[in-house]
Image (cartoon, coloured by chain):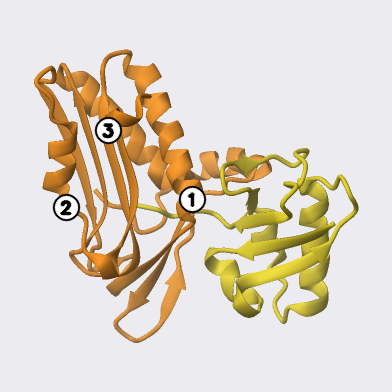
Chain colours: A orange, B yellow
Amino acid sequence: MNPEMLDARIVDIAEGGIDAAAALDFVSDPRFGGLACFVGKVRAQNLGRVVTGISYQVHAALACNLFRGFAERAVQAVDCELKLSIVHATGRLAVGDVAVVVAAGTPHRDEAFRACRMVIEAVKHEAPIWKREHYEDGDSAWSEGCSLCETSREHDAGHARGQHHGHGHG
Amino acid sequence: MIVTLTLYGALGDAAADGRVTLTLDHGARVADARQALTEHARAHWSDPRESLLARSAFASDSAVLREHDAVPDNGQLSVLPPVSGG
């Protein structure tokens, strides 16, 4: 993917939040009539517990490299011109803060929807990002997640089909 | 070779400053690093977290590695427990 077509970044929440409007601006282009955007926010509950915030840890160098790979896969899948913005937060976020934005711009809507969905699923299941939930009673816990280990992935895939886990958005 | 493993997520507080330094044979592969880290955890961690280590991947700064891949020449490995972005 042409580097000018991709905005892949990790944003330290201490240095400012993620701007979804800026992501949409990035993927806007006179050639594109379809823009799709996913915004993931920290929500106030998970698995019956009241959540007060989430601390995200990110392996930034690896994450940005993998984001480029996700973008390449999306280009192959939609087989058309595509601009993508993939931005994830790191640091401690409060309820309502934006944790992740994926925006896609393509000539038509179907490709934009598909690329956006494909990339956010990859970010959630394959990117080196970890979240620690903080609860109202002062406790905190790392969320369960998806293994990147080749010997565990098949097991996790079957598990994910059977039940939803973690603090997912939307 | 001296290898420094940086621990992420739920593994991060298992070792001081989130890092473990191990000595591996020259030409070691990721599977060797996994075995050495598991043995180190049994010997030195109050909770060796073997199940979590078994489900963790190993990576360089640019790619997730497979078990048969060689340990990077720079001796730097990241240990990635199951991920939960988004």
Q: Nearer the viewer, residue A134 or B25?
A: B25
Question: Residue A118 has which mark?
Answer: none
Question: Which residue does the numbered mark 1 point to in the structure image?
Answer: A61
Q: Find the residue positioned furthest to the right.
A: B25
Q: Secondary structure at mark 1?
A: helix
Q: Is residue A47 rendered to the left or right of residue A27?
A: right
Q: Residue at x 26, y 17 (%)?
A: A81
Q: CA distance from mark 1 to mark 2?
A: 21 Å
Residue B39: tell me if it is visible: yes
Q: Quadrant of the N terminus of chain B?
A: bottom right
Question: Which residue does the numbered mark 3 point to in the structure image?
Answer: A84
Name the image quarter holding residue B22: bottom right
Q: Residues within 10 Å of mark 2 (few under 14, many from 20)?
A: few
Q: Is residue A134 rendered to the left or right of residue B83?
A: left
Amino acid at the residue labelled 3: Leu
Q: Secondary structure at mark 3?
A: strand
Badge 2: chain ID: A
Amino acid at the residue labelled 2: Asp
Q: Nearer the viewer, mark 1 or mark 2?
A: 1
Q: Find the residue positioned furthest to the bottom.
A: A137
Q: Residue at x 13, y 25 (%)?
A: A29
Q: Nearer the viewer, residue B58 or A49?
A: B58
Q: Nearer the viewer, residue A71 or B38?
A: A71
Q: Residue at x 18, y 42 (%)?
A: A23
Amino acid at the residue labelled 1: Ala
Q: Residue at x 54, y 54 (%)?
A: B82
Badge 1: chain ID: A
Name the image quarter holding residue A51: bottom left
Marks 2 and 3, the one that precedes in the sequence: 2
